[in-house]
Amino acid sequence: MFLEVLEAEYLRDYIIKVKFNTGEVKFVDLKESLNGPIFEPLKDIDFFRQFTIHFNTLEWENGADFAPEYLFRIGEKKQN
């Protein structure tokens, strides 16, 4: 199955609640993933919050994105 992000909601800090096409919902903390020049602007929380779902994953205006497989792998199933 091709993994896709269906819905995403900013929660707090660098944590996004992500619903995948598998039906699973995971809480993804991207704080430790913001390495490299393309991700530098995302360290600004106001910019970080402005993601969209594009091509089945999270993307930001500057072109930064994360593969759905990566988001799924690092995400945690839990209640916040």
Image (cartoon, helix red, strand yellow):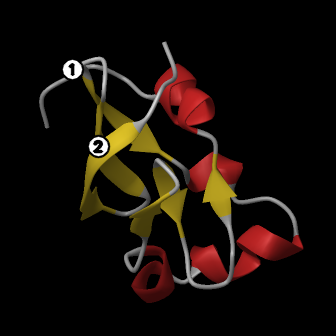
Instruction: Return the x and y of residue 69 as percentages of the image width and height.
Output: 58, 27
Q: Which residue is mark 1?
A: 23
User: Up-down: is 52 above or below 5?
Assistant: below
| Residue at screen point 62% across, 32% down | 70
Instruction: Please state the total of marks drawn on the protein image.
Output: 2
Q: Are marks 1 and 2 in contact (CB under 8 Å)?
A: no
Q: Earlier in the sequence, mark 1 or mark 2?
A: 2
Q: Which residue in the rendered view is the most extreme toward the right?
A: 36
Mark 2 crowd level (few <14, some 14–19, many ≥20, 10 Å Cα):
some
Q: Secondary structure at mark 1?
A: loop
Q: Secondary structure at mark 2?
A: strand
State the image quarter where residue 59 is shown: bottom right
Instruction: Return the x and y of residue 5 as percentages of the image width and height.
Output: 38, 41
Q: Which residue is mark 2?
A: 6
Q: Quadrant of the C terminus?
A: top left
User: Up-down: is 70 above or below 56?
Assistant: above
User: Up-down: is 27 above or below 55?
Assistant: above
Distance of mark 1 from mark 2, alpha carbons?
Answer: 9 Å
Mark 1 crowd level (few <14, some 14–19, many ≥20, 10 Å Cα):
few
Instruction: Return the x and y of residue 13 as percentages of the image width and height.
Output: 37, 63
State the image quarter where residue 34 is shown: bottom right
* Amino acid beneath label 1: Gly
| Residue at screen point 65% across, 48% down | 32
State the image quarter where residue 20 is shown: top left
| Residue at screen point 54% across, 27% down | 74
Viewer-proximal residue, 57 or 71? 57
Q: Which residue in the rendered view is the most extreme toward the top?
A: 1
| Residue at screen point 73% across, 69% down | 39
* Amino acid beneath label 2: Leu
